Image (cartoon, grey):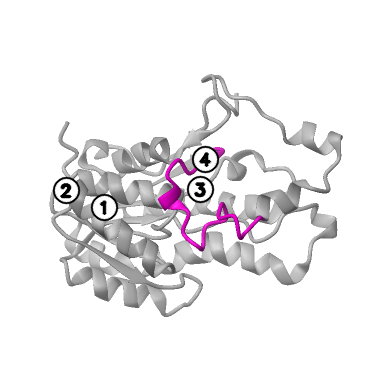
């Protein structure tokens, strides 16, 4: 199936781990020129080599911290060396903290909001003028099922992902007149399947320990509240399964789809 991505320049933020890495490799296999953004230079070099091996006519890694307001201009400049930007995948995000809101540290609230929502605003704002001028473009934001139903003990993260979803819808209304489509994917319980996906910045990296720390002190009642089940015979999704939806929405095959938020959840929200 031709996804009409051959030769398109695609920026993928948070590209060196998990979903972002899988998306970059998927786009590469469809013949896109991949601009992978991350902080781990070694993981970035591996990803670029893998993208070219998958079929990308060109690929480059941009070392950038998406929390730095200057990063989007740097990324855009590097990307435009390959051609005009056709696709933006706003994938960077994660959990800065977890626990009950009543016990939360107000000093950490903005960190969760900026990582998951501020980065989307800044990177999108950088690429839109070029897309508007060319009357074409596709933007896919990575939200979360947490933004749809609220993940227990992740109140600020859930709120930030909900903001990503709302932004997706309203931006689609604004830029549709310019030939630009905007959609979002809301993943559920996605874990990396490739050890190479564990860049040093990944929340799944052994040195992070974020999830293990968060679960160490919860009660059985709390565990029961957090528990959901899927209807596909396994509790977790692979990064590749999320990438499939992202790549479709970024492609010409989805030319009549915009302003939508698609949960990829194995039926967990049923």
Mark 4 → mark 2, Cα distance in angstroms: 25 Å
Of labels 4 and 3, earlier in sequence is: 3
Percent of width and height locating residue 28: 23, 49
Of labels 3 and 2, earlier in sequence is: 2
Residue located 31% across and 51% down the image: 24
The span picked out in magenta is: 188-209
Asked if residue 114 shows in the view, the reply is yes
Question: Tag 1, which secondary structure?
Answer: helix
Of labels 1 and 3, earlier in sequence is: 1
Disc 1 target residue: 50
Q: Quadrant of residue 129?
A: bottom left
Of labels 4 and 2, earlier in sequence is: 2
Disc 2 target residue: 55
Mark 3 → mark 2, Cα distance in angstroms: 28 Å
Question: Tag 4, which secondary structure?
Answer: strand
> In what quadrant of the picture does the C terminus appear?
top right
Percent of width and height locating residue 260: 42, 40
Disc 4 target residue: 190
Asked if residue 141 shows in the view, the reply is no
Residue 32 to residue 265: above or below = below
């Amino acid at each position: 199936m031709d996804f009409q991505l051959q030769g398109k320049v695609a920026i993928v933020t948070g590209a060196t781990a998990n979903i972002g890495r899988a998306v970059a490799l998927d786009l590469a296999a469809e013949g896109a020129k991949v601009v992978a953004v991350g902080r781990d230079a070694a993981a970035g070099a591996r990803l670029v080599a893998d993208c070219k091996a998958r079929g990308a006519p060109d690929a480059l890694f941009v070392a950038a911290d998406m929390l730095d307001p200057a990063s989007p201009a740097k990324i855009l400049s590097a990307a435009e060396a390959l051609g005009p930007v056709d696709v933006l995948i706003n994938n960077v995000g994660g959990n800065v903290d977890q626990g009950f809101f009543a016990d939360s540290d107000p000093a950490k609230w903005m960190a969760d909001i900026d990582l998951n929502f501020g980065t989307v605003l800044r990177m999108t704002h950088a690429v839109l003028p070029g897309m508007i001028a060319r009357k074409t473009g596709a933007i896919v934001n990575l939200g979360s099922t947490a933004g749809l139903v609220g993940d227990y003990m992740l109140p600020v993260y859930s709120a930030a992902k909900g903001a990503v979803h709302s932004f997706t819808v309203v931006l689609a209304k604004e830029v549709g007149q310019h030939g630009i489509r905007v959609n979002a994917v809301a993943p559920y319980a996605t874990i990396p399947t490739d050890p190479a996906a564990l860049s040093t910045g990944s929340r799944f990296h052994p040195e992070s320990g974020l999830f293990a720390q968060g679960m160490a002190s919860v009660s059985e009642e709390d565990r029961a509240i957090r528990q959901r089940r899927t209807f596909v015979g396994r509790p977790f999704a692979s990064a590749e399964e999320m990438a499939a939806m992202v790549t479709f929405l970024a492609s010409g095959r989805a030319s009549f789809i915009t302003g939508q938020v698609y949960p990829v959840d194995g039926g967990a929200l049923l």
